Amino acid sequence: MITGRGERVFDGEVGRFVEASAIPCHRCGVCCERWQPLVSGEEAARLAAFLGVEVEAFLAEYTAAYPFDDAVRLLRREGRGCVFLGRDEGGRSLCTVHPARPDTCREWTASLDRRECVDGLARFGAGAVPLAVVYPDEDERAAFAAVVRGREGRHAA
């Protein structure tokens, strides 16, 4: 049951707790533009293997020092965001290392309670935008609509 902002519910599909206001990612890229994830040694090895490079080469090319902890590195920023932020033919964001992405990125849940996601929705245009534009996939449209309906129900009481 959804009762308020910030509530977390268990999502059996992903096997963890998520925000009750979670929505399907609309691939705006705002989170990848604003955040610079930390990468542990294990994550660096996973990313290096995915890219087919040595760990040392990965660290030199794709990361920057993190001044507060020598055991982790920051993913490098390039242009408007993460060095691995790409765009598909339609202009939607995509992660070029998605199968090997850092744990922080794996744990990110798109949500109507996250400023990044709300700002990302605004990128689709001012005013009403057809859900088919934001979510071309029918299942994602239905999931988004269910969250919005739940939020409206909470405020109506």
Image (cartoon, helix red, strand yellow):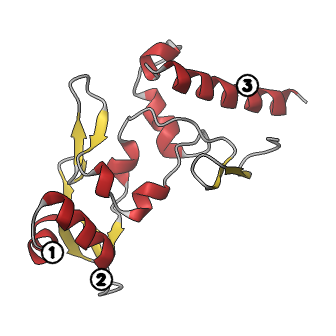
In this view, which residue lies farthest toward the bottom? 70
Q: Position of residue 86 (x, y in %)?
A: 22, 41
Q: Whole-Å distance between the Cαs marked 1 and 3?
A: 47 Å
Residue name at image x 56 percent, y 46 percent = 114
Residue ID for mark 2 = 67
Residue name at image x 49 percent, y 57 percent = 107
Residue name at image x 41 percent, y 56 percent = 105
Using the rendered view, name the quadrant where residue 104 is placed.
bottom left
User: Is label 1 in contact with label 3 (beta carbons under 8 Å)?
Assistant: no
**Which element is circle 2 on?**
loop
Residue ID for mark 1 = 55
**Residue 76 visible in the snapshot:** no
Q: Tag 3 or tag 2, which sits nearer the N-term? A: 2
- Compared to residue 82, the image places residue 144 above or below, namely above
Which residue type carries mark 1? Val
User: Is label 2 in contact with label 1 (beta carbons under 8 Å)?
Assistant: no
- Compared to residue 45, the image places residue 89 above or below, namely above
**Which element is circle 1 on?**
helix
Numbered badge on residue 149: 3
Which residue type carries mark 3? Arg
Q: Whole-Å distance between the Cαs marked 2 and 3?
A: 44 Å
